[in-house]
Image (spheres, rainbow, N blue to C red):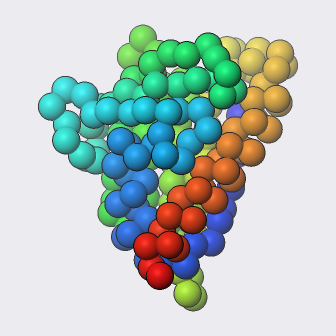
Amino acid sequence: MHAAVTVTMAAPAEQIWDLVADVRNTGKFSPETFDAEWLDGATGPALGATFRGHVRRNEIGPVYWTTCRVTACEPGREFGFEVLLGGRPVNTWHYRFTPVDGGTDVTESFRMPGGLTTTLFGIFGGQLRRRRNTRDMRKTLERIKAVVEAQGD
């Protein structure tokens, strides 16, 4: 299962990347993840760095922590991470920053790995989750856009 949303922002890719890749900002933008912190001595984005996010599923609960590992970290171009459960990736989130005339196309996406668990999840409610994630990705990107475009004024 996967989905992606793209929003054009009137700001340079590097400025947007700096905001997104510092996961401590996540709570300012995400409807579900309201807090995040670097783990294991990490102080910022780097390939393989770990962090945890505090999630309020569907904005109402349950509330839980997820552990994540950075999988893509190229300033101004991409930032991605996998959500781990028992040390194994169960979901991957990715941001791609593409310069365009007057700004940057920012694409946020998620992808769940294939397999029996994902197939069963898809049958029993996965489409609702995809719809929710798509709506929340758009909301996240629109919130980021408001901040970076206000910074440019």
Say which residue appears at 55% left-offset and 16% top-offset. Answer: 63
Quick one: quadrant of the N terminus? top right
Q: Position of residue 30 (x, y in %)?
A: 56, 42
Say which residue appears at 39% left-offset and 33% top-offset. Answer: 36
Residue 70 in view, yes or no: yes
Q: Position of residue 82 (x, y in %)?
A: 45, 33
Say which residue appears at 79% left-offset and 38% top-offset. Answer: 131
Relative to 42, 148 lies left or right: right
Q: Position of residue 153 (x, y in %)?
A: 47, 82
Q: Position of residue 72 (x, y in %)?
A: 38, 49
Relative to 4, 77 lies left or right: left
Q: Quadrant of residue 113?
A: top right
Say which residue appears at 19% left-offset and 41% top-offset. Answer: 43
Relative to 124, 146 lies left or right: left
Relative to 5, 123 lies left or right: right
Looking at the picture, tell me which residue is in the foreground, 12 or 112. 12
